[in-house]
Image (tube, helix red, strand yellow):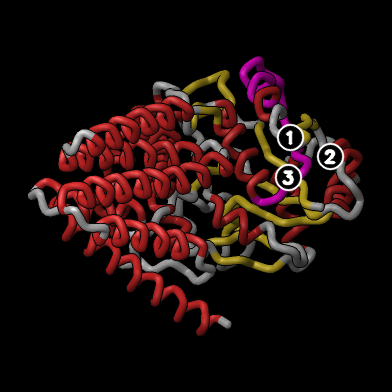
Amino acid sequence: MLAGLIFAIEEASDRPGTLVATLPFGGMTLLEYQIRLLAGAGAEHVLVAVGKMTPALLAAVNRAGRRELSVEIVRSAEEAAEKMQADARVLVMADGLVTTDPVMDRMGHDGPEALLVTDDADSPAAIERLDMRDCWAGVARISVGQLGQIAQMPEDYDFQSALLRVAAQSGAEHVPLTANWLRSGHAVEHSAEGMAARNTSILAALTERRIGWADRWVFTRIARMALPELVSRNFPGWGLLAAGGVLALLSFTAIGYDWEGTGLIVSLLSAATLATGGAMAALRGEERRARGIEWALLVLFGGVVLGCGWMERARLDTTTPLVLAVVALAAQLLVERAPSRHRRWWASPSAHLLLLTPFALAGLAQFGLAAVALYAFVTLAAAVEGTREKA
């Protein structure tokens, strides 16, 4: 069993009386975001170590506890050890830590005790020096037995520092903090101003989840501009999904009235809205919704390409455009289900929409359908070859 332990003790340096854990982050509090990361790593039980209880902290714990995991408050290592299952692996997050899913996934793996470290003492992730070379970078994997060791110490010990010392003295593995994790926003912050800046870098990292060229150069950039403003206003995730759905229906309607160029433009707006919604869902730990939005983009592409194929079939009095549309959709569906790692140049629903749009605006939708069918088929061939090499 994997459990989590989060420290929520220190006050924000620029907001006296406000705990760092309750500072706003990603449309929620930092504590809720940390609990979301632990849940994503597989934790079933989370303890929050506190020094004092505040209304904001209690509200954050209550909100986080509505998820499918248990969240409890503890005040000492002894209390924490009593509440943990004896054979649990405990993933520890430092007070004020901001990080991302890849870091938590790496540290949450099965294995012996481990400490995330950096050899740069001036790094924003460096918390406390472990030896002449490494500093702790805010995440640790420990055993319940080590919590029990801390419980035997004098009452005036610092819980977080003592835990770190016990883990280091036990010979815990040192896992180096990578440059990619640091660029993605991994750091420890103790001010509201620093947390707001870190929030922006985390949002940018989340929009990079979709690696295709169309997403990277078009839709991700739109999401990166829109997401901070939406999050700061606590805009509901379902609102973006609803807006994307309405735009998709308008796109299908325009294509049905033989306004294919207009329909493609509206479909791009729908794709941008859905992509932003997917990034927001990932930030809030709504992985099921994020995956659903990825499939919604495929449905959007399918509706657009089949609509264009049908209209071109009627206009040109040949079934070729419709056949090309069906081939493009079928090939892309197989690409989406391919187990091999997707490449940046590969076809995606959003890439197909970008490719088809200029043809539709020029009144040459049938050539656009041929182009997307060829693109999808070439990508499928690459996916099959990648799967074969992997096997």
For residue 322, the mark is none
Crowd rating for badge 2 (residues with CA inside 10 Å; few <14, some 14–19, many 20+)? many
Q: How many marks?
A: 3
Q: Which residue is mark 2?
A: 80
- What residue range appears in magenta? 41-61
Q: What secondary structure is marked by label 3? A: strand
Near-viewer residue (151 or 275) = 275
Res 51 → quadrant: top right
- Marks 2 and 1 in Cβ contact (< 8 Å): yes
Q: CA distance from mark 2 to mark 1?
A: 8 Å
Res 71 → quadrant: top right
Q: CA distance from mark 2 to mark 3?
A: 10 Å
Residue 157 horizontal side relative to residue 372, left or right: right
For residue 49, the mark is 1
Q: Which residue is mark 3?
A: 4
Q: CA distance from mark 1 to mark 3?
A: 10 Å
Q: Name the amino acid type tagged 1.
A: Ala
